[in-house]
Image (spheres, rainbow, N blue to C red):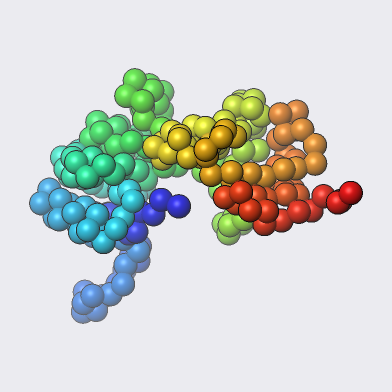
């Protein structure tokens, strides 16, 4: 895994909301910041604590962190060889994050053509989390294959969805030499299913075989 530790959000713009100001030090879901130097310190702290990447909240219903604040986060992260992911669901929030130089946009549900074209021009990855939009319930842990199914519902072919989850994801993580494809010298993290996922991507919902780092963790096929 690559772990972002705590997200970084603008003061008052992330859960929990409506907490009495008398409750000093109340636990929050993100590290709250306000101003360029506050952001710089937060990023440096997180890297010092071992964060593999930095996650920012570019918006929360409305744009929150400024371009300048996010630019400083990108500057500090990239100096340390870390990438920056930005939660952004509004067109302006996405454009602000892309202008600031982030490496990926998480969710992006409200993206318009202009923001998508900016992302394409700058080589910014989109991590869409479409399965959450389609799901009847919010708790989706262990149902990762639904994301690939959701991608095909929106126009990707099965092989394009599979590549998005494997080779493209490995490139975003800067791990193309370790994971993402079946080649000698890589981690040998593999799954197998009954059926052809290139013909029907939904078969990926029923994983029969799992290998982790070359070690078989699950073998659901009949043994000869």
Does residue 137 appear to the left or right of 194 in the view shown?
left
Does residue 126 appear to the left or right of 22 in the view shown?
right
Q: Residue at x 29, y 58 (%)?
A: 50
Q: Residue at x 24, y 79 (%)?
A: 23
Does residue 46 appear to the left or right of 142 in the view shown?
left
- 11 or 81: nearer the viewer: 81
| 85, above or below 23, in the image | above
Tell me residue 59's x, y (percent). Answer: 32, 46
| 44, above or below 78, in the image | below
- 196 or 15: nearer the viewer: 196
Inspect this view and state whether residue 166 appears: yes
- How many discs appear? 0
Q: Residue at x 26, y 47 (%)?
A: 64
In the displayed image of the protein, which residue is found farthest to the bottom?
22
- 82 or 145: nearer the viewer: 82
Tell me residue 169's x, y (percent). Answer: 48, 37
Task: Determine the image quadrant of residue 166.
Answer: top right
Q: Residue at x 67, y 45 (%)?
A: 191
| 124, above or below 66, in the image | above
Tell me residue 52's x, y (percent). Answer: 33, 51
């Amino acid at each position: 895994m690559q772990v972002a530790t705590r997200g970084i959000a603008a003061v008052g713009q992330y859960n929990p909301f409506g907490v009495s100001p008398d409750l000093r030090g109340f636990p929050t879901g993100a590290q709250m910041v306000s101003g360029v130097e506050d952001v710089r310190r937060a990023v440096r702290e997180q890297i010092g604590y071992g964060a593999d990447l930095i996650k920012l909240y570019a918006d929360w219903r409305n744009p929150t962190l400024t371009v300048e604040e996010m630019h400083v986060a990108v500057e500090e992260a990239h100096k340390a060889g870390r990438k920056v992911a930005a939660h952004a669901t509004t067109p302006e929030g996405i454009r602000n994050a892309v202008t600031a130089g982030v490496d990926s946009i998480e969710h992006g549900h409200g993206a318009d053509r202009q923001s998508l074209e900016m992302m394409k021009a700058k080589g910014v990855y989109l991590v869409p989390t479409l399965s959450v939009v389609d799901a009847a319930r919010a708790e989706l842990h262990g149902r990762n294959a639904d994301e690939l199914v959701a991608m095909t519902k929106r126009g990707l072919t099965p092989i394009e969805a599979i590549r998005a989850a494997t080779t493209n994801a490995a490139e975003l993580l800067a791990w193309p030499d370790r994971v993402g494809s079946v080649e000698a010298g890589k981690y040998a993290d593999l799954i197998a299913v009954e059926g052809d996922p290139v013909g029907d991507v939904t078969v990926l919902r029923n994983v029969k075989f799992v290998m982790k780092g070359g070690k078989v963790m699950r073998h659901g096929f009949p043994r000869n």
